[in-house]
């Protein structure tokens, strides 16, 4: 067996240029194999580290728990840690929202509340405040000072009358940036004070807790467990709040794995194709060598071992090098991505953790995984060459001294030119030529397809698709939020802030072209998905939107008069994701609450349409505004869509913002926001994709280099021969260039041709999936030009370098010692 | 008789120091036009090196090779290549055919490189002469050793070169084909008035030559 290794080692040295290329291919493959999962894994890990650093650490809370239940919950064996918080009341203030809580010490720990000064309130009159809160009240006071606050305690869900109360400041809380910006503060008081102002049986706590779990626990199971406990204590699901940030940061989310696996698969395929073809291409030449080894008595198994070991010898150098380089690259890369992500509160935490090395970016298993996957890649690509080498018969290898190409007659040319020489050579080795072109094209087509996807993703178009006009003022409603019952839809429309007067005000603003009014009605329908109502909004659109409505119809027919009737609707195609059974001609029953009574109506589905988000939002049932308005007596105006002269105008935005703010529960969205959002998220994707494609292309170019070097290397003697009978250096350079041009043009033809064609269905798919809100097809001209230029340049450089290297060796040496 | 080749004080050394090999060591000789000259000598004595320099394949360390009175190493490499394909035909021991070209293409390759129109009839005549007419479209891999060598000879002859340099052209052949090949080449010299310079270590072949040059350790020992 030792002999086998020796031969393999000698082979490796002998076929140096090929093995250097294989080495580079393995190196690049390793780089990708490590960096892709590492960046994926680390950014998730970092996010978690930041979350753990900044966010509360309870898993879930139960709301409205009375003292008795708190005591029983405490005794539950699954509870690992628990804390209490109770909302006692508010400190009245015009500008700021100041909540008054009682929290026990574990509660404060779970909320990550740390004092900047003093101690927690113990005495009845003690209170803990923040500087920002005092500022908002216009009070200057320090530790130990006595202050008076206008306190409103809760009676049930309602706030009581203001009572001026005297407190002594016992400690200070820090103000977060977010708190200062939103003017939301809190004050903590003692248990004694709470018990004094609220009768014991009326005190309701938030029970914050963690149950015992480890990082392998799946989030869904954990949630089920928490719901289970709630059930036992008679706490309804609506009273459970989950701390998802914390949960996702600390426990397993099985969803991220498949994506990383898919990318790794692509890398493996590219790696296998390249390494395989590098080996395959030199195989024909080496058949003789292996035949000789076999003739000297090597078994099939030994020959296979020789090929395998030669490959692994190269991997032994390339793999650690790849790991080392990627280890060095990882941290700067992560920092770069973080910076790309723009500014956020998260980012600082990110950078801090990265710089201080608070998070293990280099888990050992990632190295192991990369090694295993890279070696498997090498092994896979060696399988066929191994088989082939082992299968050669000794006689075969000996007999065909002069390469095996063309053992049949060939008509050939009457006259020869340099061009024809190149052609016959390519034809004689057509299997190799085709293989090279195919393998390079596969990578090339992949590049083109991804480039198409990237070029179709235009932030401006995505923003257009996401918003009807340039600004949207809509009702700021929220359902099921115990904290904000006033945001329930039926409460908001009772006094709809989107008034005709507001509309007129908007229309008067400079730069506004027109304002469209959309009507939204909350309903219940008989369409269900996993026990929940699927379609719960009806959208009424003005006639000016009818053209777009009609254009988007994918099935059925609808006229404007149909939509005016009020019992015929277009179904948004998005609904079919939840309820695939919906068809044109179906009846859908909706129920609307009218003065406490449920009124039901039947709607006929006359068409199904695929629309941009900007038109429909989350609404599934669409008809005319007139029909929607007649559903309820209240004013159901859901949004004003503002079409402006310019996509973005800071002055107009500010004016609209002011109007929205002064109208109460009105939320505003702008085109600019959407644009920035898309631009940001596309940017990152783009850079990641481009980096990925670059490395893939480099792997692919290895292939071209190999084919060219090899074709010159094995023909050294042949080329020398041709020169001996009178081929000039210029003629040889021309011949090599023509051969290279053939590979390049073949590859380019396939890459650009097939790549462009394949890109289109990818665009259609993205559009259908509303991925990146893609709407228009853009041909990736830039990418195509870059691919062409790079390929041609590489090929020209390569042939020039090759012709020169051939010249360096004297003619006679090439003829005499060609092996 | 006119001298077609004149070698003047030719030197070619390989390696240096202890490994210095004096492949051709201050050699001078003349080769007469229209004759068959045989170069003989022990293996490693420098015969091939000398022949390569006579044919302009290799450049000497010093000394000159005059062909028709012209110093061939005074030419630039591309000009030398052009000179070679017009004036000199090579036949090697191991044939050196181009495997991707068929027999016809192999033969006309020097013409193609010269950018010349192929005089089909003339080439066919030579092929017939060499008994290759039926093998026009065959690929080298299908031919026997003797046939391959005949293709190589046809290739050397096709341009009607003034000089044919043959380096042990029969070394890889059995004695039957060997005689055939040498006979053919001699016939060419006679019929077309060409000059043949052939390296051989076969006594019989050397005896057929008009002139025999014996080389030893890179030096001409005798010329007769
Ligand atoms: N490229 C080379 N490098 C080193 N030594 C060489 C080279 N070419 C020839 N030689 C040496 O020069 C000497 C003469 O070689 P050669 O002319 O081939 O001899 P012959 O043809 O008479 O057998 C030999 O000793 C050979 O080893
Ligand atoms: Mg020799």
Image: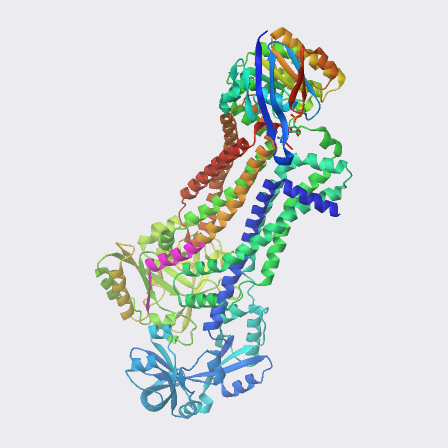
Q: Quadrant of residue A289?
A: top right
Colour setting: rainbow
Q: Quadrant of residue A592?
A: bottom left
Which of the image's four quarters has the C terminus of chain B? Answer: top right
Q: Nearer the viewer, residue A49 or B29?
A: B29
Residue B77 locus on image (x, y percent): 51, 24
- Left or right: A498 as drawn, with respect to A741: left
- Res B98 seen here: no
Residue A163 locus on image (x, y percent): 32, 89
Residue A335 locus on image (x, y percent): 45, 61
How many labels were placed on the picture?
A: 0
- Left or right: A140 as drawn, with respect to B131: left
- In the rendered image, the residue lying farthest to the right is A297
Residue B16 locus on image (x, y percent): 61, 34
- Res A4 seen here: yes
Considering only vertical position in the picture, is A604 above or below A211? Answer: above
Locate ligand 1 by image quadrant.
top right
Q: Main secondary structure of the magenta part?
A: helix
Considering only vertical position in the picture, is A160 above or below B155? Answer: below
Residue at position x 44%, y 61% from top?
A338
Specify whether residue A671 is painted magenta.
yes
Residue at position x 29%, y 84% from top?
A139
Q: Nearer the viewer, residue A692 or B64?
A: B64
Which of the image's four quarters has the N terminus of chain B? Answer: top right
Considering only vertical position in the picture, is B42 above or below A547? Answer: above
- Left or right: A780 as drawn, with respect to A386: left
- Left or right: A185 as drawn, with respect to A390: left
Q: Nearer the viewer, residue A106 or A559?
A: A106
Range shown magenta: A666-685
Specify whether residue B121 is painted magenta.
no
């Amino acid at each position: 067996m030792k002999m086998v290794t020796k031969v393999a080692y000698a082979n490796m040295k002998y076929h140096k240029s090929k093995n250097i290329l294989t080495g580079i291919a393995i190196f690049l493959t390793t780089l990708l194999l490590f960096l892709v999962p590492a960046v994926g894994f680390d950014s998730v890990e970092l996010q978690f580290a930041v979350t753990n650093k900044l966010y509360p650490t309870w898993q879930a809370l139960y709301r409205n728990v009375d003292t008795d239940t708190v005591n029983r919950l405490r005794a539950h064996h699954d509870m690992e840690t628990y804390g209490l918080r109770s909302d006692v009341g508010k400190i009245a203030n015009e500008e700021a929202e100041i909540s008054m809580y009682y929290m026990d010490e574990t509660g404060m720990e779970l909320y990550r509340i740390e004092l900047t000064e003093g101690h927690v309130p113990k005495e009845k009159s003690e209170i803990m405040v923040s500087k920002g809160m005092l500022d908002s009240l216009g009070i200057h006071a320090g530790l130990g000072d006595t202050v008076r606050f206008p306190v409103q305690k809760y009676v049930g869900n309602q706030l009581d009358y203001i009572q001026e109360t005297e407190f002594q400041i016992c400690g200070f809380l820090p103000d977060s940036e977010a708190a200062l910006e939103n003017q939301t503060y809190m004050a903590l008081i003692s248990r004694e004070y709470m018990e004094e102002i609220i009768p014991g049986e009326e005190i309701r706590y938030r029970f914050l807790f963690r149950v015992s779990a480890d990082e392998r626990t799946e989030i869904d199971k954990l949630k089920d467990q928490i719901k289970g406990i709630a059930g036992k204590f008679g706490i309804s699901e609506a009273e459970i709040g989950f701390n998802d940030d914390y949960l996702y940061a600390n426990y397993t989310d099985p969803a991220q794995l498949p994506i990383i696996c898919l990318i790794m698969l692509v890398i493996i395929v590219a790696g296998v194709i390249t390494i395989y073809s590098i080996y395959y291409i030199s195989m024909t030449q080496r058949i003789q060598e292996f035949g000789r080894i076999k003739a000297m008595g090597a078994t099939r198994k030994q020959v296979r071992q020789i090929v395998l070991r030669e490959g692994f010898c190269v991997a032994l150098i390339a793999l650690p090098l790849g790991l080392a380089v990627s280890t060095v690259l990882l941290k700067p890369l992560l920092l770069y991505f973080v910076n790309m992500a723009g500014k956020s509160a998260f980012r600082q935490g990110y950078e801090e953790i990265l710089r201080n090395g608070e998070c293990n970016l280099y888990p050992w298993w990632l190295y192991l995984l990369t090694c295993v996957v890279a070696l498997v890649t090498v092994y896979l690509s060696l399988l066929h060459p191994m088989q082939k080498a082992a299968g050669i018969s000794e006689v075969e290898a000996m007999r065909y001294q002069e390469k095996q190409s063309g053992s049949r007659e060939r008509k050939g040319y009457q006259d020869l030119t340099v061009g024809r020489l190149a052609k016959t050579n390519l034809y004689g080795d057509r299997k190799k030529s085709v293989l090279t072109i195919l393998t390079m094209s596969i990578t090339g087509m992949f590049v083109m397809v991804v480039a198409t996807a990237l070029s179709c993703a235009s932030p401006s178009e995505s923003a257009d698709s996401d918003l009807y006009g340039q600004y949207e003022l809509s009702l700021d409603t929220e359902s099921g939020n115990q904290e904000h019952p006033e945001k329930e839809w039926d409460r908001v429309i009772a006094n709809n802030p989107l008034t005709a007067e507001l509309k007129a005000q908007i229309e008067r603003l400079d730069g506004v072209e027109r304002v469209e009014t959309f009507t939204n009605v909350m309903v219940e329908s008989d369409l269900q998905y996993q026990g929940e109502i699927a379609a719960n909004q009806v959208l009424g659109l003005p006639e000016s939107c009818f053209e777009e409505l009609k254009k988007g119809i994918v099935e059925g027919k609808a006229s404007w008069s149909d939509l005016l009737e009020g019992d015929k609707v277009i179904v948004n195609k998005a609904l079919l994701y939840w309820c695939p059974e919906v068809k044109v001609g179906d009846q859908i029953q909706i129920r609307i609450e009218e003065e406490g009574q449920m009124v039901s109506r039947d709607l006929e589905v006359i068409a199904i349409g695929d629309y941009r988000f900007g038109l429909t939002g989350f609404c599934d049932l669409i008809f005319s505004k007139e029909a929607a308005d007649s559903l309820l007596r209240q004013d159901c105006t859901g949004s004003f869509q503002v079409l402006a002269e310019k996509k973005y105008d800071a002055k107009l935005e500010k004016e609209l913002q002011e109007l929205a703010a002064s109208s109460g529960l009105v939320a505003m969205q702008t085109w600019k926001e959407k644009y920035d959002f898309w631009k940001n998220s596309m940017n990152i994707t783009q850079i990641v994709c481009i980096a990925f494609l670059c490395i893939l292309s480099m792997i692919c170019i290895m292939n071209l280099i190999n084919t060219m070097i090899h074709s010159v290397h094995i023909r050294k003697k042949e080329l020398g021969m041709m020169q001996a009978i009178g081929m000039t250096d210029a003629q040889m350079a021309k011949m090599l260039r023509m051969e290279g041009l053939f590979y390049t043009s073949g590859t380019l033809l396939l890459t650009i041709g097939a790549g462009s064609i394949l890109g289109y269905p990818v665009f259609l798919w993205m559009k259908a999936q509303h991925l990146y809100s893609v709407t228009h097809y853009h041909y990736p001209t830039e990418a195509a030009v870059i691919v062409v230029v790079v390929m041609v340049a590489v090929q020209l450089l390569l042939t020039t370098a090759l012709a020169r290297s051939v010249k360096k060796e004297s003619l006679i040496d090439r003829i005499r010692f060609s092996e | 008789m006119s001298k077609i080749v004149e070698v003047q004080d030719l030197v070619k050394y390989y390696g240096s120091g202890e490994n210095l090999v004096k492949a051709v060591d201050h050699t001078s000789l003349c080769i007469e036009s229209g004759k068959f000259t045989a170069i003989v000598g022990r293996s490693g004595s420098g015969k091939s090196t000398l022949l390569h320099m006579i044919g302009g394949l290799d450049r000497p360390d010093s000394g000159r090779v005059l062909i028709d009175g012209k110093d061939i190493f005074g030419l630039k490499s591309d000009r030398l290549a052009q000179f070679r394909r017009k004036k000199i035909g090579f036949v090697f021991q191991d044939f050196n055919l181009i495997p991707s070209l068929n027999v016809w293409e192999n033969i006309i390759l020097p013409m193609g490189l010269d950018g010349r129109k192929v005089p089909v009839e003339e080439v066919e005549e030579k092929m017939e002469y060499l008994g290759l007419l039926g093998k026009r479209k065959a690929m080298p891999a299908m031919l026997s050793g003797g046939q391959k060598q005949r293709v190589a000879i046809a290739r050397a002859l096709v341009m009607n070169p003034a000089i044919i340099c043959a380096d042990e052209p029969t070394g890889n052949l059995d004695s039957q084909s060997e005689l055939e090949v040498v006979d053919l080449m001699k016939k060419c010299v006679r019929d077309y008035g060409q000059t043949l310079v052939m390296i051989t270590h076969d006594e019989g072949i050397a005896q057929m030559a008009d002139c025999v040059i014996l080389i030893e350790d890179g030096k001409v020992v005798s010329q007769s």
